[in-house]
């Protein structure tokens, strides 16, 4: 069972084990971070490591896994990446295509919010690498997004202790809030663009009217 294996790895390797388990979420998407992260919090509640250490190691694992996937996308290119994705068990090429389309529409925002959305969390680093997104910016956005996501679920697992498994039931609610925040951000961006365009057109028309 995945939960038992993850707990045993964390107990034997400590924080490094937590980093390895969480990093696999990026490299092998069928491993859900909604399950792994609360387990890290549960292990912290048992004294395997401290809560700050759990947040540090899980975020390090998330970022390390994301960087590996980014480099893979950068070196392989789009078509070879799609062929590689097609060989991953329980993963469809359409998953990559949807993530790529999301990255194309939202750019840097997709990297940040993508760390908090299922499916996109594991794949968003691929199109970022394929498009050779500025690496320092990718690193910062990935770290911040991962830290927020990990803090929520590791903290919940720490507080719930033996009942850590209840966290997974609330994951969907948090993910919907993230998507809603992204939608609001896009709407505000479009409104501002339209307003600025309208103001520019108005300033161009005013001199003509005066003439």
Image (cartoon, helix red, strand yellow):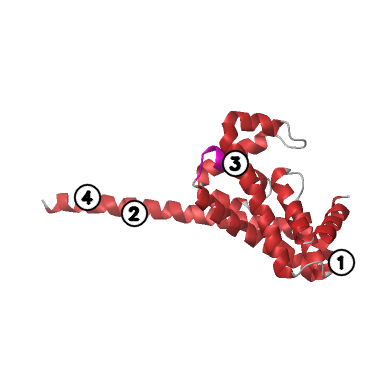
Please tell me whether mark 4 or mark 3 is closer to you in this view.
3
The answer, for residue 148, to whether it is visible in the render is yes
Compare marks 2 and 3 and give the one earlier in the sequence: 3
Residue marked by disc 3: 71
Compare marks 1 and 3 and give the one earlier in the sequence: 3
Q: Nearer the viewer, residue 152 or 1?
A: 1
Disc 1 to disc 2, C-alpha distance: 54 Å
Compare marks 4 and 2 and give the one earlier in the sequence: 2
Whole-percent x, y for residue 109 in the image? 53, 52
Q: Which residues are magenta?
A: 126-133
Residue marked by disc 1: 162
Q: Secondary structure at mark 4?
A: helix
Compare marks 1 and 4 and give the one earlier in the sequence: 1
Q: Nearer the viewer, residue 89 or 60?
A: 60
Number of residues whose C-alpha sits closer than 10 Å to that of mark 4, classed few (under 14), some (14–19) or many (20 or more): few
Q: Secondary structure at mark 1?
A: helix
Number of residues whose C-alpha sits closer than 10 Å to that of mark 3, classed few (under 14), some (14–19) or many (20 or more): some
**Could you tell whether 30 is left or right of 124 in the image?**
right
Disc 4 to disc 3, C-alpha distance: 47 Å
Please tell me whether mark 1 or mark 4 is closer to you in this view.
1
Number of residues whose C-alpha sits closer than 10 Å to that of mark 1, classed few (under 14), some (14–19) or many (20 or more): some
Question: What residue is shown at x 25% (from left), y 53% (from top)?
Answer: 202
- Would you place residue 48 above or below residue 114 in this image? below
Q: Is 118 in the magenta?
A: no
Residue marked by disc 4: 204
Residue marked by disc 2: 196
Marks 1 and 4: CB-CB under 8 Å?
Answer: no
Marks 2 and 3: CB-CB under 8 Å?
Answer: no
Q: Secondary structure at mark 2?
A: helix
């Amino acid at each position: 069972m995945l939960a038992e294996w993850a707990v045993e790895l964390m107990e034997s390797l400590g924080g490094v084990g937590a980093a390895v388990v969480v990093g696999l979420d990026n490299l092998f998407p069928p491993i859900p971070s909604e399950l792994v992260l609360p387990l890290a919090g549960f292990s912290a509640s048992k004294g395997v490591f401290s809560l700050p250490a759990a947040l540090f190691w899980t975020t390090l694992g998330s970022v390390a896994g994301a960087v590996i996937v980014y480099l893979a996308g950068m070196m392989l290119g789009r078509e070879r990446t799609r062929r590689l994705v097609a060989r991953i068990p329980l993963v469809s090429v359409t998953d990559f295509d949807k993530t790529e389309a999301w990255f194309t529409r939202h750019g840097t925002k997709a990297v940040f919010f993508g760390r908090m959305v299922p499916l996109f969390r594991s794949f968003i680093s691929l199109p970022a690498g394929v498009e050779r997104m500025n690496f320092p910016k990718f690193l910062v956005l990935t770290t911040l997004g991962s830290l927020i996501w990990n803090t929520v679920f590791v903290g919940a697992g720490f507080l719930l202790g033996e009942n850590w498994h209840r966290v997974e039931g609330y994951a969907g609610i948090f993910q919907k809030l993230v998507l809603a925040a992204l939608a609001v951000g896009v709407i505000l961006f479009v409104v501002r663009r339209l307003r600025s365009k309208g103001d520019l057109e108005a300033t161009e028309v005013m001199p003509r009217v005066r003439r």
